[in-house]
Image (cartoon, rainbow, N blue to C red):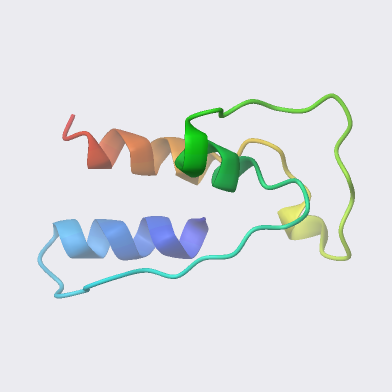
Amino acid sequence: MGNIAAGTLSRLCGLPISRFVGGVNINDIVHRGVANGKYYRVFEMKKCLSEAINIQAPYNFERLLYWTVGM
């Protein structure tokens, strides 16, 4: 989410970016939030090999929502 947030901010500043591609881990909170609007943390987080993505609610997703609704 960090790279997509940075790219979105760059696009808002005028950089011509047409699309973004992102991936999710097994916890898939971002996918649930985008696909059906259910952005919630689950009781038990499944750990992945990379500690950097072992999070449940990425702050950058909230930033993206803020930017995309034009606030």
Horizontal arrangement in the rendering, residue 3 relative to residue 13 (left or right): right
For the image shown, how many numbered marks are present on the structure?
A: 0
Q: Position of residue 3 (x, y in %)?
A: 46, 65
- At which x and y percent is residue 58? 59, 42
Question: Observer-nearest residue: 38 or 64?
Answer: 38
Q: Residue at x 20, y 64 (%)?
A: 11
Viewer-closest of 29 and 61: 29
Quadrant location, the C terminus = top left
Residue positioned 88% across, 65% down in the render: 49
**On the rendered structure, is 36 left or right of 49?**
left
Left or right side of 58 for 68: left
Name the residue located 13 percent from the left edge and 60 percent from the top edge: 13
Furthest residue to the left? Answer: 14
Residue 24 in picture, x, y percent from top left: 64, 58
Q: Nearer the viewer, residue 68 or 60?
A: 68
Percent coordinates x, y for residue 66 in the rendering: 30, 34
Residue at image location 89% in from the left, 31% down from the top: 44
| Quarter of the rendering containing residue 63 | top left
Seen in the picture, residue 6 relative to 35 is either above or below; the reply is below
Image vertical order of residue 3 relative to residue 54, above or below:
below
